[in-house]
Amino acid sequence: MSTTTETQTQNQTKFGTTADIPIPRGSTKASLTFYSAPPDGAAPFNYVEPQPEGHPQRNFGEFNQEVTIQDVRGRESDFDMNTNGFSVIQGVSSEEKDFADDEHIKQIYYPEVEKVLLENAPGANRIFLFDHTVRRSDPGAKRTPVTRAHIDQTTKSATARVHLHMKEEADELLKGRVRLINVWRPLNGPVVASPLAYADSRSVPDSDIIGVEHRYPDRTGETASVKFTEQGRWHYLSGMKNDERILLQCYDSKDGARTPHTAFTDPRTQPGWPGRESIEVRALVFG
């Protein structure tokens, strides 16, 4: 396992500082959290909002397993969404700086994300951005990094998403290629805590991907949890910067590549290092 580090020059932002922090580089070993089935054999579920009185927030368990996570830094071009389920985009500028106001994000940042997808998702001819999540490592934050291996969409929920957002166009659009892609980036890079790990889609069999009811107050969707498999090949991009993007393909009606992913605790992260701040934008990609 490599423990190469690289000292980061000062980068002071309102989100924290990475001045003089030695960025961990190379492969690492870390414990990831995987799916464990409900003990009573029931169908798994998870409540998005606080659960009704008398119900658990989720009815399935967790299984922790140490895995090797390979660094893709220096070989970013070796990975492709259609093959691996993820790809790395570099040198992307943004006019959005604060990421504090949802409407401002939609007005300024969404068009930038659409451009990234049209230029980097081969065949894409139409994009519909349907939501985003800002995550901050502060315990008091509204949303924090997710530390369970998962995939945001399943075939069932992807089809439902198209109908939900595209209305009368849905049936025609579903005759063509449909992808759901997350565009992920840090806000206070380079990332030195809670980096994002993603598995090569080919290394996780369908039998280890489990649909979970995702219960909203007004509807029920579906996400996927991921069982541990010895075959799983996990990756991350060390010291990810603000001008870099990870494209995570959660669903593809043509090729089937889908990307298990999770935040993880890198054992090389030191106390006092700034926690990760990030945003993911979720997109329906047609064509």
Image: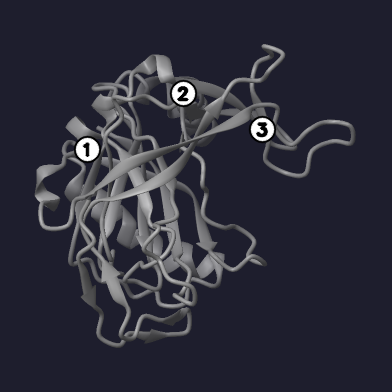
Query: Which three-letter amino acid code belongs to the residue tagged 3?
Result: Asn
Q: Nearer the viewer, residue 223 or 192?
A: 192
Q: CA distance from mark 1 to mark 3?
A: 28 Å
Find residue 240 and report its image quarter: bottom left
Amino acid carrying label 1: it is Met
- Please state which amino acid type lies under the numbered disc 2: Thr
Q: Is residue 78 left or right of residue 118?
A: left
Which comes sooner in the sequence, label 2 or label 3?
Answer: 3
Residues at marks 1 and 2, CA–CA distance in whole angstroms: 20 Å
Residue 217, how many percent across, how many down? 75, 37
Image location (x, y in percent) of residue 154: 46, 25
Numbered label attached to residue 46: 3
Q: Looking at the image, is mark 1 or mark 3 earlier in the sequence?
A: 3
Q: Secondary structure at mark 1?
A: helix
Closer to us: 203 or 177: 203
Q: Nearer the viewer, mark 2 or mark 3?
A: 3
Where in the figure is residue 50, as x and y percent of width and height?
A: 77, 44
Circle 2 SS class: helix
The residue singled out by tag 1 in the image is 81
Tell me: residue 26, above or below residue 43: below
Up/down of 273 relative to 59, above or below? below
- Mark nearer the viewer, 1 or 2: 1
Q: Does 231 appear above or below 129?
A: above
Whether residue 271 sits left or right of residue 196 in the image: it is: right
Question: Disc number at residue 97?
Answer: none
Q: Position of residue 132 (x, y in %)?
A: 49, 53
| Label 2 sits on residue | 159
In the rendered image, which quarter contains the C terminus?
top left
In percent of the image, x 52 and y 60: which residue is there? 135
**Residue 122 position by quadrant:** top left
